[in-house]
Amino acid sequence: MRQLEVYMNDRKAGVLTEQHPGKGYVFQYDIDYLSSDSPSVSVTLPKSKVAFESDLLFPFFTNMLPEGANRKVICRSLRIDENDFFGLLSAMAGKDFIGAVHIEPVGI
């Protein structure tokens, strides 16, 4: 099981979990974030006490990944399978993302 913390405007919004390698994903909002007036991280992931579950990595997070030649170079240099979207997202954790949402390793 791999996990990443999801931040919205530098505030922890929740945790993204890969339950099984390559499939089985859960996004759970942080209880403090739910009680705040902060917006949801995505229109497709509205604030909810109920965890979101999917067999595939949520499109919102997949869209945060580099594409094309950049993805190939990053995956090759870090020895990550190009189809391991969670692994690539984990490798990008702590880096500069475009927009208000960014990803951090758990416990940072």
Image: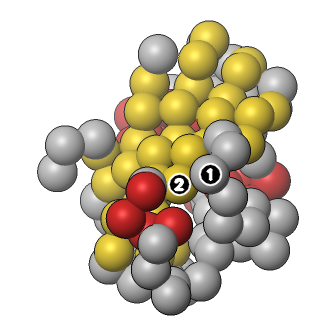
Q: Nearer the viewer, residue 39 or 83?
A: 39
Q: CA distance from mark 2 to mark 1?
A: 7 Å
Quarter occupied by residue 22: top right
6 and 28: which is toward the camera:
28
- List the residue tagged with mark 2: 29
* SS at circle 1: loop
Task: Specify the amino acid type for callout 2.
Answer: Tyr
Mark 1 residue type: Lys
The x and y percentages for residue 105 are 29, 45
Q: Which residue is mark 1?
A: 49
Which dot marks residue 12? none
Lateral position of residue 53 relative to residue 105, left or right: right
> Residue 23: x and y, percent?
73, 19
Front one among 12 and 1: 12
Can you say whether 90 is above or below 35 in the image? above
Above or below, 38 against 91 in this view is below
Does residue 103 sit above or below 42 in this rendering?
above
Q: Residues within 10 Å of mark 2 (few under 14, many from 20)?
A: many
Q: How many marks?
A: 2
Q: Are marks 2 and 1 in contact (CB under 8 Å)?
A: yes
Q: Give the structural element (helix, strand or loop) at label 2.
A: strand
Relative image position of residue 96 (x, y in whole percent): 37, 73
Residue sticking out furthest to the top: 20
